[in-house]
Image: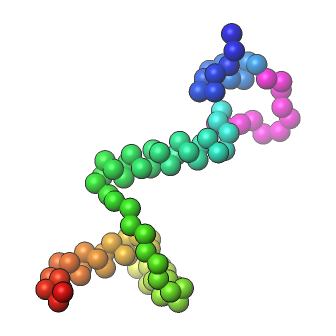
Amino acid sequence: MTAQKEDRTTIDMFKAKEVGRPRTNPYARKEQLRINKRMQRERDKAKGLKRVELKIPANNLDELDKVARAHRKTRAELIEQIVDDFLNKEHLSLF
């Protein structure tokens, strides 16, 4: 019997005792990040969210962060609100 990478119940049976704080997750950090990222993508997909990448000058980003902090929102929440407000005011007729 050998320990499988995904085996959570017997993973500690086959290795020597380690000194220090016990591991709270049987996976290596790299594997944890991969699993968490996949779960995040699945949650976003279930909510109907799509990923958008945006490049803006650093000073604009700093100002955006200040406004977000002042309104106790995340940067993503603030950008989402700005886009929603723009689209709801039907500024699209400008184009």
Up-down relation of residue 43 to residue 75 (above or below): above
Instruction: Looking at this view, name the residue that lies furthest to the front.
Output: 95
Question: Is 24 a magenta residue?
Answer: yes
The vertical placement of 66 against 17, above or below, is below
In the rendered image, residue 88 lying in the magenta stretch gets the answer no
Answer left or right for 41 relative to 90. Answer: right
Question: How many numbered marks are there?
Answer: 0
Most extreme residue toward the top, as rendered?
A: 1
Q: Position of residue 39 (x, y in %)?
A: 45, 44
Residue 95 x %, y %: 18, 86
Please tell me whether residue 54 is drawn above or below residue 16 in the rendered image: below
Question: Would residue 16 be found to the left or right of residue 70 on screen?
Answer: right
Look at the image and tell me whether residue 66 can be seen.
Answer: no
**Quarter holding residue 75:** bottom left
Which residue appears at 32% of the width and 58% of the height? 49
Instruction: Give, as a single range, the part of the protein colored magenta.
Output: 15-25
Q: Is residue 33 left or right of residue 13?
A: left
Q: Residue at x 17, y 83 (%)?
A: 92
How is the protein colored in the picture? rainbow
> In this orientation, which residue lies closer to the viewer: 3 or 77?
3
Q: Is residue 85 above or below residue 77?
A: below
Quarter placement of the N terminus: top right
Please say whether residue 49 is visible from this viewpoint: yes
Identify the residue at the far right of this view: 19
Q: Position of residue 67 (x, y in %)?
A: 44, 84
Q: Position of residue 20 (x, y in %)?
A: 83, 39
Residue drawn 79% across the image and 23% down it: 15
Q: Magenta-highlighted stretch: main secondary structure? A: loop
The structure residue drawn at horizontal position 33% and vertical position 72%, both measured from the top left corner, is 80
